[in-house]
Image: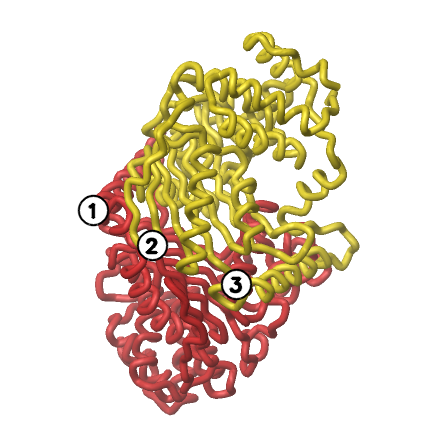
Chain colours: A yellow, B red
């Protein structure tokens, strides 16, 4: 795959300028751009600037509200419900993380459920902020309808991502961050954009037949990972992300990737546990590091074993300040820049 | 497989008598026996009375403490830490569920972490109690060391079960209840006892080679379900179940199935969200039922699709008051009765 290198700061500035041109206020544009570039830096390009053109189009066509008025519709004990008024998911999550941190600090645990949100990028961006503050964190979300339950053929479920992070004294936190589909929807889109096939087992076509063609997969249904177990996990994430608010289930929405003006009413659930309220932050972080080290040394045959989150952390460490983008993504971003009357990204090499 | 039918009440009485003979107080014996028979009634025999002989042996040899003094070592806001003093997991969970219910009712969410516990049976037994009270619930646990991380060969992880339940207005709640190993440890033990092979993909032998022989699997390592994704989930469950307490990680324990006097210091995490603190119990339960119905109708080809938890609920409904046990389990229980000087189970048909 042909790639290009860019300074991270230049990419962030490009993203912020594009989002501001699409109507976002500067702070919202900046935090969103940072979250996307952070994913690119970690090699998670499916949740990086590849998303920017869609965000811009949706902001201009009403699928995402550029000037939302966030409203706390319920506050009770250690919990709160946020109506994000169609905001970008990053804007909603920024508010949710701040609130859940306060709730967890005061009560040992905090929970924020979110309705009327949209795509929040990579969940790990939010859980690592919570882990940096000493919280164990769990974040889930609904998405557009793309996945069929185990045994089904219809796209009843979203890719239903979840992120769980345990704070660690290691260089990086311990994090499981995944779509519960066999493959991420963004990776299927990336494969289509880059003319690559997708792995067997990721999807069925519109007739329910297995396919490795990303176009056919996007017209059919993705499959949950891990057969019946992964499917059960996915259904529960859908339930927990949408039933504690008035958020829509995936099957009740039209995907913004299909119709950019679709107001998806995405739901999120954010849970933060303050390690200080249990056996103490130092204790927990040291225990988690111990587990990471034991996982890494778990092969008798000398195979390299990664603790969850290690690969992305290493990618970011190797990258330093420079971010790699696929040439196809650069082309998309240059077209976006032209559309918005901005300088093309490819000039800032 | 040869089977026998028994009235549920008779089985419960048998279990209670056996556990009392092993040193448990009546109430503890009764709640434990009920939890096991409940699993058998639902067809989840791996977590049913099959476990009774081990419980009895461990209670007599010190692996499980028959007369524990449960102690709350930390109480802070909406959280609490329970030291179960080596109690049966059912005894620990009974206390944890009561406490987490109170915390959730008062704060919208409650969290109890547990250390010095043992095997708690099927997680769904506890989350359904919480769901019956209108709580969404999440329960996780460590276990003995049986699973190797994705890419590894050593049994660093437990089967790391988790149970997530969303309360529903349907006949049954929506529940994902699973070991994060490809197969449950108890099912591998059951397969060995019944001279059956285990499915491909469940395990590797001591040399790291794939095997379908349950004996070889018990001497090697189980595999996580869902490859890298399931493995990441498993590692996070291990971290969250053991690092918020002084509980042991799986690799720091000797499995009670291997050495019955092993005091495993099992850790659990219990989270309960009060639906009443969000958009209301009626709203949530009705939304969850809607999702269950949509999942069940998700096949265009007419294939029966089950919502998570449906199969076990149907088994229990069909069973009515009568519980089916494998003849091999009845033999084990009769041998146990003889050992304890009790009437054999097979006389109460």
- Mark 1 touches mark 2? (CB < 8 Å): no
Element at label 3: helix
Residue denoted by label 1: B282
CA neighbours of label 3 inside 10 A, class few (<14), some (14 to 19), many (20+)? many
- Chain under callout 1: B
* Residue at the spot 62% in from the left edge and 56% down from the top edge: A168
Compared with A348, B66 (above or below) is below
Compared with B234, A67 (above or below) is above
Q: Which quadrant holds residue A17? A: top right
In x, y percent, where is residue B31?
31, 75
Count the marks: how many?
A: 3
* Residue at the spot 37% in from the left edge and 62% down from the top edge: B78
Q: Which quadrant holds residue B39? A: bottom left
- Chain under callout 2: B
* Residue at the spot 60% in from the left edge and 52% down from the top edge: A174
* Residue at the spot 31% in from the left edge and 58% down from the top edge: B107
Of labels 1 and 2, earlier in sequence is 2
Q: Residue furthest right?
A: A302
Residue denoted by label 2: B273
Q: CA distance from mark 1 to mark 2?
A: 14 Å
Residue denoted by label 3: B185
Q: Is residue B25 left or right of residue B231?
A: left
Compared with A225, A170 (above or below) is below
């Amino acid at each position: 795959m042909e790639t290009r290198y860019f300074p991270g700061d230049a990419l962030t500035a490009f993203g912020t300028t594009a989002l501001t041109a699409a109507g976002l206020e500067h702070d919202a544009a900046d935090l969103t751009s940072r979250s996307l570039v952070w994913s690119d830096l970690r090699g998670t390009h499916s949740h990086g600037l590849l998303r920017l053109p869609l965000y811009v189009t949706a902001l201009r066509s009403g699928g995402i509200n550029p000037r939302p008025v966030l409203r706390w519709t319920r506050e009770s004990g250690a919990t709160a419900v946020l109506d994000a008024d169609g905001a970008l998911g990053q804007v909603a999550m920024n508010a949710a993380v701040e609130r859940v941190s306060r709730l967890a600090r005061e009560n040992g645990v905090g929970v924020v459920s979110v309705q009327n949100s949209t795509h929040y990028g990579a969940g790990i961006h939010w859980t690592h902020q919570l882990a940096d503050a000493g919280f164990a964190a769990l974040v889930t979300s609904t998405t557009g309808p793309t996945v069929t339950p185990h045994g089904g053929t219809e796209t009843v479920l979203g890719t239903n991502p979840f992120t769980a992070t345990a704070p660690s004294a290691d260089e990086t936190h311990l994090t499981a961050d995944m779509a519960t589909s066999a493959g991420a929807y963004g990776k299927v889109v990336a494969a289509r954009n880059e003319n690559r096939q997708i792995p067997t087992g990721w999807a069925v076509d519109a007739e329910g037949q297995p396919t490795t063609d990303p176009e056919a997969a996007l017209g059919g249904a993705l499959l949950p990972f891990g057969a019946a177990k992964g499917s059960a996990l996915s259904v529960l994430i859908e339930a927990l992300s949408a039933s504690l608010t008035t958020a829509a289930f995936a099957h009740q929405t039209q995907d913004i990737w299909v119709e950019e003006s679709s107001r998806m009413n995405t739901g999120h659930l954010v849970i933060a546990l303050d390690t200080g309220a249990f056996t103490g932050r130092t204790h927990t972080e040291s225990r988690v590091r111990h587990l990471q080290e034991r996982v890494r040394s778990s092969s008798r045959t000398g195979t390299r074993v990664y603790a969850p989150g290690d690969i992305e952390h290493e990618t970011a460490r190797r990258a330093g300040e420079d971010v790699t983008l696929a040439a196809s993504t650069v082309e998309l971003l240059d077209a976006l820049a032209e559309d918005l009357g901005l300088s093309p990204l490819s000039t800032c090499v």
